[in-house]
């Protein structure tokens, strides 16, 4: 009960702070519309005037619905992106504000603190996903297969990986403080390797091997099977399993790294330094 | 007397390396705290007095478990901070880093309710405690205003309120009046005395000797990471009873004048300062034979072409104790 109270308190506090900076709503309404447009229009152009390029796309993906393929990737990416980096950026913000030590002085589990903060980001991610789906359906006229429960499930299977990666990064924030360069590098690499806007099958063999080490690759494949290709949960079960298995591994790794770095920080006395 | 906080042979050494590219070439060790031991008894205000960088905050951070000691141990209400950190933290309310330790984008009430939840209070209890504390701190009228609109003194009060939220038996206050105007500092000191009346044990760090003198039952004077004296303020001052001090306000001070005064038999120390507003110098001379030396002081000053504006013979203060022990002023 006490742990839930901590998580709820941190989430509530973050929500209040978020509401007091209301410009995020504009970003969340407009960004999902703009972001995929670049890739959809590129795909439209590369398909050729007679759309013959779509045959190649279909051969690689099993569907001609390239717009659906892209927006599902973008939606999943936005949710993963917002939640995953929220751990590290939250700790960083607390360091800069000077409130991190105040929280660390309370008898709380550090992970509850991080989870509470990430809940608001997860909520933002979910809000973006809902807005995105509505905008894509009614503005771009994109059709999604499956039902809302399946779509929700596709987001949920990435949770362990998102939280694992988030903890890994929050540990690095405690240690190195400013990690924007690292985040951008990892973000860019993941965007390519997971095949956010294109099928991973078109990548060179070595890149495909690397992409399989990332749980999000499998999460995206599962989402596309269900939402774009009209597949069933059974069709996506292999990818779901791999996404969960690698995600749980990342979760363990994230916890271990965070614990180790917190101990190191307690020895060096650099918790509040920024 | 029952002990609330037990600090035993506490040491904190920080290691830093000089690097050439990525290779470590030279290792340096800095002793921030070097073998500090003391007990704080239940219900007392214990002052840690020392100049900036003496190791006061480092000690507080080790008591709260934010820093791991290189050596030594800390017990709070009988609980080992290293072995039972969460239980120990539940018995401590702490103010660190003053006004920056609370959220400026939240109201005073939201801040306190938030921290109450982190200390395990349910919604109703959190609201009750928050209202009680806001009333105690005189903030109830401003409870629903954003902290960013508060003055420094009010922000500091919210930070103190955060420390009071757990209703913990031990309260640690790190420089609680730093940067406050005299009136706000006085208000805060009254609140601290009120906490003592309620039976709380308070550890207070400060580099304001008047504050330590006014509030503390016992004081540990710390310098260079070591405790150099520990006693009641009265006993500390009595310990230098034979040392007198004279404060001389004058128009000019040169190195030669200071050296000549220092060279007199019986003079232990000469501290000089300049008052920008009055445009005058002040010499504080610590000595053991005042009456006999007074005429010599006057002679030396006039020989150095300076004019005396004022002379005061002072009662020993904690500053004098510190100067007597270290040879330098607390503010140096």
Image (cartoon, rainbow, N blue to C red):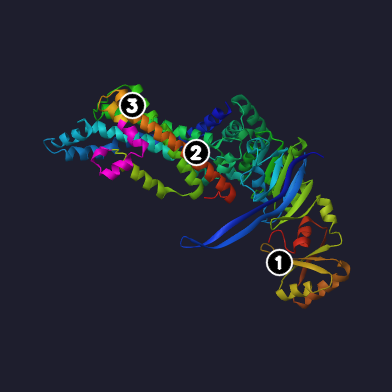
The residue located at (68%, 52%) in the rendering is B11
User: Tag count in the figure?
Assistant: 3
State whether the magenta stretch is mostly helix, strand or loop.
Answer: helix
- In depth, the one of A52 and B211 nearer the eye is A52
- State the residue position of label 1: B280
Give the distance between the C-alpha atoms of the residues marked 2 and 3, in whole angstroms.
Answer: 27 Å
* Residue underneath mark 3: A237
Residues marked 1 and 2, same chain: no
Q: Give the distance between the C-alpha atoms of the residues marked 1 and 3, in whole angstroms.
A: 85 Å
Crowd class of label 3 (few under 14; some 14 to 19; many from 20; radius 10 Å)? few
Please determine whether, in this image, residue B176 is positioned above or below residue A79: below
What secondary structure is found at the residue carrying circle 1?
Answer: strand
1 or 3: mark nearer the eye = 3
Mark positioned earlier in the residue sequence (2 or 3)? 3
Residue at the left extreme, as displayed: A50
Host chain of mark 2: A
Where is residue B170, by image quadrant? top right
| Residue denoted by label 2 | A255
User: CB under 8 Å between callouts 2 and 3?
Assistant: no
Q: Residues within 10 Å of mark 1 (few under 14, many from 20)?
A: some
Residue B205 visible here = yes
Q: Is residue B175 left or right of residue B102?
A: right
Marked residue chain, label 3: A
Q: Chain of mark 1?
A: B
């Amino acid at each position: 009960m006490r742990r839930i109270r901590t998580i709820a308190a941190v989430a509530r506090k973050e929500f209040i702070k978020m509401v007091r900076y209301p410009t995020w709503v504009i970003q969340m309404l407009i960004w999902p519309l703009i972001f995929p447009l670049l890739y959809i229009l590129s795909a439209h152009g590369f398909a050729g005037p007679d759309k013959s390029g779509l045959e190649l796309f279909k051969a690689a993906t099993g569907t001609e619905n390239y717009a659906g393929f892209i927006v599902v990737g973008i939606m999943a990416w936005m949710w993963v992106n917002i939640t995953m980096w929220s751990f590290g950026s939250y700790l960083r913000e607390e360091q800069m504000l000077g409130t991190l030590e105040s929280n660390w002085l309370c008898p709380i589990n550090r992970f509850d603190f991080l989870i509470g903060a990430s809940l608001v980001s997860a909520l933002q991610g979910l809000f973006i996903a809902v807005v995105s789906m509505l905008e894509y359906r009614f503005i771009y006229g994109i059709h999604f297969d499956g039902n809302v429960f399946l779509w929700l499930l596709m987001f949920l299977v990435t949770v362990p990986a998102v939280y694992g990666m988030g903890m890994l990064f929050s540990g690095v924030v405690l240690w190195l403080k400013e990690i924007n360069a690292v985040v951008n590098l990892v973000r860019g690499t993941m965007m390519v390797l997971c095949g956010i806007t294109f099928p991973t099958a078109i990548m060179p063999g070595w890149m495909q091997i690397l992409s399989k080490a990332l749980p999000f690759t499998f999460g995206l494949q599962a989402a596309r099977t269900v939402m774009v290709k009209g597949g069933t949960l059974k069709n996506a079960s292999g990818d779901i399993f791999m996404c969960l298995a690698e995600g749980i591994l990342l979760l363990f790794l994230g916890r271990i790294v965070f614990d180790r770095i917190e101990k190191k920080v307690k020895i060096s006395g650099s918790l509040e330094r920024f | 007397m029952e002990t609330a906080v037990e600090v035993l042979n506490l040491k904190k050494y920080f290691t830093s390396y000089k690097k050439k590219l990525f290779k470590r070439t030279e290792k340096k060790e800095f002793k921030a705290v070097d073998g500090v031991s003391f007990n704080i008894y239940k219900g007392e205000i214990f002052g840690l007095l020392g100049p900036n960088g003496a190791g006061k905050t480092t000690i507080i951070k080790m008591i709260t478990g934010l820093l791991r000691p290189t050596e030594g141990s800390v017990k709070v209400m009988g609980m080992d901070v290293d072995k039972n950190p969460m239980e120990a933290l539940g018995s401590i309310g702490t103010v660190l880093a003053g006004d920056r330790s609370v959220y400026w984008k939240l109201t005073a009430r939201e801040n306190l309710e938030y921290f109450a939840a982190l200390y395990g209070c349910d919604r109703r209890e959190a609201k009750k405690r928050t209202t009680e504390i806001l009333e105690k701190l005189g903030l109830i009228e401003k409870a629903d205003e954003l902290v960013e609109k508060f003055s420094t003194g009010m922000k500091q009060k919210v930070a103190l309120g955060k420390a009071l939220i757990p209703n913990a038996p031990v309260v640690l206050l790190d420089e609680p009046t730093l940067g406050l105007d005299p009136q706000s500092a006085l208000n805060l000191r009254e609140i601290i005395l009120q906490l003592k009346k309620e039976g709380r044990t308070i550890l207070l760090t400060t580099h304001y000797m008047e504050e330590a003198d006014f509030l503390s039952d016992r004081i540990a004077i710390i310098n260079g990471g070591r405790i150099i004296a520990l006693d009641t303020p009265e006993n500390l001052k009595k310990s230098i009873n034979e040392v007198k001090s004279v404060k001389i306000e004058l128009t000019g001070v040169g190195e030669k004048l200071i050296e000549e005064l220092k060279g007199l038999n019986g003079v232990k120390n000469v501290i000089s300062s300049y008052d920008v507003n009055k445009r005058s110098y002040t010499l504080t001379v610590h000595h053991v034979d005042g009456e006999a030396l007074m005429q010599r002081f006057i002679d030396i000053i006039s020989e150095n072409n300076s004019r005396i504006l004022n002379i005061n013979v002072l009662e020993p203060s904690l500053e004098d104790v510190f100067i007597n022990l270290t040879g330098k002023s607390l503010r140096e």
